[in-house]
Image: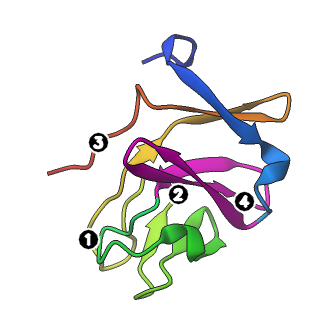
């Protein structure tokens, strides 16, 4: 789906998300963690590790990944996939930043592979 046809929802300012940190938002019954890298890239993933559903928003951000605080699984912020020998995936949501405003698209979320 082309970015201009996605249903974008503003969720805050980039300055609301600390560098190498996160901020959570609720969308219905889903908690989405917004992460900001050193390069000011913004990623949005479900705040749930595919291993034991640990709160990824409380993990350590590094190299476009986050390490789960419960069992040290490393999850790609780009794809939601577990890295290394671990297997699993969490939902990811497309993001954009325009004029310092962060938006996510719920229409084009990538589903977890079965």
Per the image, label 3 sits on a secondary structure element best described as loop
Q: Nearer the viewer, mark 1 or mark 3?
A: 3
Query: Badge 1 is on which residue?
Result: 87
Query: Badge 3 is on which residue?
Result: 111
Per the image, label 4 sits on a secondary structure element best described as loop
**In percent of the image, x 29 and y 42: which residue is there?**
111
70 magenta-colored: no
Q: Are marks 2 and 3 in contact (CB under 8 Å)?
A: no
Q: Earlier in the sequence, mark 4 or mark 3?
A: 4
**In percent of the image, x 37 and y 77: which residue is there?**
84
Give the numbered dot on residue 33.
none
**In percent of the image, x 60 and y 36: which residue is there?**
95
Per the image, label 2 sits on a secondary structure element best described as loop
Rendering coords of residue 22 (x, y %): 66, 62
Rendering coords of residue 86 (x, y %): 30, 77
Neighbourhood count class around disc 1 (C-alpha, 10 Å): few under 14, some 14–19, many 20 upward: few
Q: Are marks 1 and 2 in contact (CB under 8 Å)?
A: no
Give the numbered dot on residue 37.
4
Q: Are marks 2 and 4 in contact (CB under 8 Å)?
A: yes
Residue pushed farthest left? 114
CA gap, disc 2 and disc 3 = 14 Å
């Amino acid at each position: 789906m082309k970015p201009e046809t996605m249903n974008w929802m503003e969720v805050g300012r980039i300055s609301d998300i600390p560098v190498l940190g996160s901020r959570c938002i609720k969308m219905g019954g889903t908690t989405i963690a917004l992460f900001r890298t050193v390069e000011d890239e913004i990623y949005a993933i479900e705040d749930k590790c595919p291993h034991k559903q640990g709160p990824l928003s409380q993990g350590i951000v590094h190299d476009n990944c986050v390490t789960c605080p419960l069992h040290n699984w490393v999850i790609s912020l780009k794809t939601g996939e577990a890295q290394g020998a671990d297997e699993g995936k969490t939902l990811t949501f497309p993001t954009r930043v325009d004029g310092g405003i962060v938006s996510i698209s719920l229409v084009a979320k990538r589903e977890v592979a079965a």
